[in-house]
């Protein structure tokens, strides 16, 4: 298990667009056979769709998935790809947050893959299915080919919000545990990185933060209109 961050960093890590449970808690739910529970923000603006969670077995751990539902009949339409038993920490519907585009044609879903690690999946909704769209990897745009993986993270905050039906703002903050490679990583991050002044000296971190303005394209891809350093949040 990863060492705990300072209480302040841990609290921020658990609050993303998605972040719905306390960072130290795990949310579980044991589902009935036909129980599909709408996640937070899961109802689409058009009132005809929703996103719901369902799993089998104790704590919903077996075959857990999120589903696109037809409303008001609350009938399953399709399983959302990219969110399944091997990807998630929680099974309770309160641990997932949907952000629908105003026209109900796209939805972003936030969740945790680890206690302090936020994830977002983005989908295009149409033709009775949910097509996954890659979420821009802001950190990778800065570090390029440097060897960095989620195992290097102490915490990650990821937030997607809609500006129009096709334009969105994405904010990403990552806290890395300070190590012998931190000086080199700090140089790579440049203005996108900093060492927070107010942090736990027992577990120092190096922080990355970036913000992007993106636009979805008809082919199920995106382009970035703006990309810049973000608001540093850890250690505040």
Image (cartoon, helix red, strand yellow):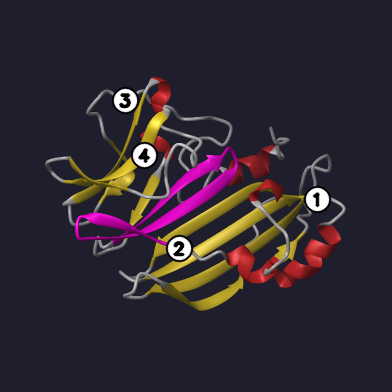
Could you say whether the residue bearing mark 3 is in a helix, strand or loop?
A: loop
Residue ranking furthest to the right: 180
> How far apart are the two marked residues, 1 and 3, measured between alpha carbons?
41 Å
Pinpoint residue 137: horizontal percent, then vertical percent. 56, 64
Q: Is residue 184 left or right of residue 135?
A: right
| Numbered disc 4: secondary structure | strand
* C-alpha span from label 1 to label 4: 35 Å
Q: Which residue is mark 4?
A: 65
Nearer to us in this view, 58 or 162: 58
Picture quarter with the N terminus: top right
User: Which residue in the rendered view is the most extreme toward the bottom?
Assistant: 225
Asked if the stretch drawn in magenta spans residue 115, the answer is: yes
Residue identifier under label 2: 134
Residue range of the region highlighted in magenta in the rendering: 106-133
Q: CA distance from mark 2 to mark 1?
A: 29 Å
Q: Are marks 1 and 3 in contact (CB under 8 Å)?
A: no
Select label 3 or label 4 by which is in front.
4
In the image, is residue 150 above or below residue 146? above
Instruction: Give residue 178's mark.
Output: 1
Q: Secondary structure at mark 2?
A: loop
- Estimate how packed mark 2 is, as few (under 14), some (14 to 19) or many (20 or more) residues with alpha carbons within 10 Å: few
Q: Who's the residue at 45% across and 73% down the image?
A: 214
Q: Counting residues from the N terminus, which is met first, the one under dot 2 or under dot 4?
A: 4
Q: Are marks 1 and 4 in contact (CB under 8 Å)?
A: no
Q: Is residue 132 left or right of residue 90?
A: left
The residue where tag 3 is placed is 31
Q: Which percent across, then down, holds residue 12?
A: 59, 46
């Amino acid at each position: 298990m990863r060492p705990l961050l300072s209480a302040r960093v841990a609290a921020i890590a658990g609050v993303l667009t998605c972040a719905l449970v306390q960072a130290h808690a795990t949310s579980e739910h044991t589902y009935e056979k036909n129980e599909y529970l709408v996640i937070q923000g899961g109802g689409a603006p058009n009132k005809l769709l929703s996103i719901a969670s369902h799993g089998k077995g104790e704590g919903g751990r077996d075959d857990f998935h999120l589903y696109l539902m037809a409303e008001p009949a609350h009938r399953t339409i399709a399983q959302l790809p990219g969110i399944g038993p091997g990807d998630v920490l929680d099974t309770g519907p309160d641990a997932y947050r949907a952000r629908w585009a105003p026209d109900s044609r796209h939805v972003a879903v936030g969740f945790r893959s680890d206690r302090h690690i936020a994830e977002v999946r983005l989908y295009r909704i149409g033709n009775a299915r949910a097509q996954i769209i890659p979420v821009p990897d802001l950190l990778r745009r800065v570090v390029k080919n440097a060897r960095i993986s989620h195992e290097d993270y102490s915490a990650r905050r990821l937030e997607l919000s809609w500006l129009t039906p096709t334009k969105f703002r994405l904010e990403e903050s990552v806290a890395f545990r300070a190590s012998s490679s931190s000086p080199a990583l700090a140089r790579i991050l440049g203005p996108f990185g900093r060492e927070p002044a107010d942090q736990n000296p027992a577990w120092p971190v190096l922080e990355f933060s970036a913000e992007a303005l993106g636009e979805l394209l008809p082919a199920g891809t995106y382009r970035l209109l703006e990309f810049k350093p973000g608001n540093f949040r850890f250690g505040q």
